[in-house]
Amino acid sequence: MKAYGVNELRKMYLDFFESKDHLKMNSFSLVPQNDKSLLLINSGMAPLKPYFTGQEIPPRNRITTCQKCIRTGDIENVGKTARHGTFFEMLGNFSFGDYFKTEAIHWSWEFLTEVVGLEANRLYPSVYLDDDEAFDIWNKEIGIPAENIFRFGKEDNFWEHGAGPCGPCSEIYYDRGEKYGCKKPDCTVGCECDRYIEVWNNVFTQFEGDGNGNYTELSNKNIDTGMGLERLATVVQDVDSIFDVDTIKALRDKVCEVAGVAYKKDAKIDVSIRLITDHIRSVTFMISDGIIPSNEGRGYVLRRLLRRAARHGRLLGIKDRFLATLSTTVIKESKDGYPELEEKKDYILKLLTIEEDNFNKTIDQGLTILSELEDTMVKDGTKTLSGEDAFKLYDTYGFPLDLTKEILEEKGFKVDEEGFQKAMKVQRETARSARAVTNYMGTDETVYQQLDPVLTSAFVGYDKVSHSSKIMALTTESEVTEELIAGQSGTIFTEETPFYATSGGQAADTGIITTVDAEFEVEDTIKLQGGKIGHVGKVTRGLFKLSEKVNLSIDVNRRLATGKNHSATHLLQKALRLVLGSHVEQAGSLVTNERLRFDFTHFSALTKEEIQRVEEIVNAEIAEALPVHTDIMTIEEAKKTGAMALFGEKYGDNVRVVSMGGFSKELCGGTHVSNTGNILVFKIVSETGVAAGVRRIEALTAVGVFAYYNELEKELNLAAKAAKTEPVNLTKKIEAFQEEIKALLSENEKLKNKLAKDALGDVMNQVTEVKGVKLLAAKVPDVDMNGLRNLGDQLKDKLGDGVVILASAMADKVNLIAMATDTAMAKGAHAGNLIKELAVLVGGGGGGRPNMAQAGGKNPAGIDAVVEKAPKTLENQLK
Ligand code: ATP
Ligand code: MG
């Protein structure tokens, strides 16, 4: 047998099934589309769900793919088993109501034994317990001896996912020989060790399950198979593990080189090497599909994998940043099958670098927190770090549990792992409940799922604003119907339509649908599975019937305004790349008739100068009056022209390329101006951050800009009027105001001080002496607490030595302070205690330090009593 390479095997498989009339399709993005039940694509079948349920018509009844997959559930296995990665590629062949068990089994056998050349007597199939049909095919048709076919139960050999299509499986195991075995006497197919390795799983989707163990036979039976490409390569190349196959070994070697360590010298080091090798593949592919590190969902998975890799790099003794270097090797080894890696290279490397730098920062913060926690443990005399604290380190500082454990173990501490898991579970459950699973498809149930999946609409609106066509379906808000009558809300589907449905960030057209006797107001246009375009709105007059011919007219002004904003978005994207660099990628957009919003990857706020540069470039291209052209071509041709495409977007065979002179070329299905001159003018009105590494620009064009400036001008005129001047003099006037205010404030301050002093009159007359301590107890009108304190300080200075007690009524409240100098305190005076006793007289309470205390009260009538009783109270304190 020839030891085929990974890239060769991928091609052999796809070619083989193409020769069996399968349509070869590219891998779908790792990000599920319209599927809320799944965080990341984890099998070849996952992105094909709508074909399995019949909600969409597949382009052919037989499809074959090599799908990139992420399985976070396998994260604990990675590095420890020979066969698990968090990232892997799954080869698959699929039948939608076409061929079934016989062909599926025969072809998988033919591929493994004849195309690849695996030894037949090393292959062991398994079937579901009572799937005699599959058993007989293996036994009687292929000729596998009965004792070499294993029957497994539901857990292993029945594929089921809640309610929906499900069915028995037949797996194929390969015996890699004794040297890989666990040597236990009962080691055989199904053993957890690495001798018998599952390479292929054929799922026979033949039932519809209700989720409660009741099954009905499907009329359209499907085939869904999955074979790990890396696993196939492992057995074909007869190597130890998926980490030894050609492409991955190249990466593994690079890891060793960067870390300066050797593989297969130390088992613990090997785990770290394999782990980094795997995780860097996952993160590279995830980033290339537009996932951005964050603290939730997919972004969190990315962050976790990335940090885990970075940490194991430290364990191997790597000091500097290293992830981007390794990612370069991933890109080199896999760009054959995944050209998007090369296309997004700049961006991938930049993002990796920034995220790794960030982690290097939190790791130090986390270490500080951890050492503080150690101190507390020592103080409390405990040896175990609480689960919550360990989880906090994990959650906030990105510390994996094993890192925390390792550090603590060195110092004789443990971690409450159970508590950690509990905290983790609570968080997971919160995350899960936030991700409501609705049905098998992971979409919300809507009336549109009752529509016939063969229905599809053609969009004819690129060069038409009105058109006549036949109604092919009607729905009310809750059901499919044959008629819609005045007053009813619902959706009209026609065979052809000039209405643009919301997609690619461009907002929908609105308008009207009419017959001679009836009118329907289109409030929104939506695109549904299977290419159906729905006109959502309300019948305002008459009756609409199925199969009737209608006239469809869009709101032309709205369409034109939207087109200006959309075309400007293209110019903007190109300008951003010119000003900021080629790492700029579109991360989202929203184009309406009123404004445009463009989200893009960039790692810091734009400066004023950058924003200005971008605006200048866009306006220059508008002034150039570039003609706008659209061409239909294959995706390969489009990429060759250098057209910009979206992250992980699944494009059909033929794509539409919109070019503006020689300046911008983008894959786009939207509607545009015919010449950039029509945009008139472009203005950025805001630039903000929306997520880590993602910036957002909002901008206006044409009349939108004039409206914006009109609004500003109006505001400016109002401001000038309020300032009793002309707009041109407004700034000077405001500066003059500010000067004036400053002068007034300082004068006010002086006056207030003077007033307080005047109010006091000549209080120094009121100084008495109590047992050799000078006492000034006085009533002053209308001074607040702050004022009293200032006053008290001044009087204390004048007094030189002694005690000051001041009381003042303001409105219905009383403010009271007492102060004592050091000498007075030495003789027994205590301001706090004085206040405590005296405050009672004004209906209040308070206290304070021996040298200074204050209190509030509610009874101004009591102030005289305070002054009167002060000498006696002080006397009682003195020795
Ligand atoms: P295992 O029991 O070995 O984890 P599985 O039952 O989870 O495998 P399936 O869900 O049937 O595997 O996936 C189909 C095929 O995908 C498997 O036969 C295997 O070749 C491959 N595969 C599954 N998980 C991984 C993984 N973590 N890394 C690499 N290949 C995998
Ligand atoms: Mg598994």
Image (tube, rainbow, N blue to C red):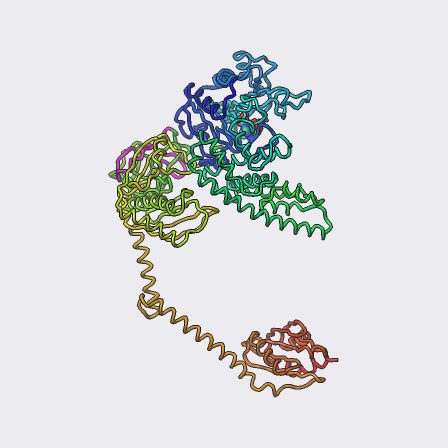
Residue 138 percent location from the top left of the image: 54, 15
Question: Quick one: which residue is furthest to the right in this view?
Answer: 879
Start-end of magenta stretch: 454-482
Does residue 318 appear in the picture of this structure?
A: yes
Residue 719 percent location from the top left of the image: 35, 65
Q: Is residue 455 covered in magenta? A: yes
Choose top left, top right, bottom left or bottom right for residue 143.
top right
Residue at 61% in and 83% down: 798
- In the image, residue 126 above or below residue 394: above
Q: How many marks?
A: 0
Q: Quadrant of the C terminus?
A: bottom right
Q: Considering depth in this image, is 470 or 539 the residue closer to the camera? A: 470
Residue 214 percent location from the top left of the image: 54, 26
- In the image, residue 70 above or below residue 574: above
Left or right: residue 542 compared with residue 61: left
Q: Considering depth in this image, is 534 or 788 the residue closer to the camera? A: 788
Question: Quick one: which residue is furthest to the left in this view?
Answer: 516
Question: Quick one: which residue is furthest to the bottom in this view?
Answer: 765
Q: Quarter of the picture for ligand 1?
A: top right
Q: Considering depth in this image, is 541 or 692 the residue closer to the camera? A: 692
Left or right: residue 443 compared with residue 318: left
Does residue 862 appear in the picture of this structure?
A: no
Choose top left, top right, bottom left or bottom right for residue 653.
top left
Residue at 43% in and 21% down: 15
Left or right: residue 412 compared with residue 757: right
Residue at 61% in and 19% down: 177
Choose top left, top right, bottom left or bottom right for residue 130.
top right
Q: Is residue 304 covered in magenta? A: no
- In the image, residue 18 above or below residue 845: above
Residue 63 percent location from the top left of the image: 43, 24
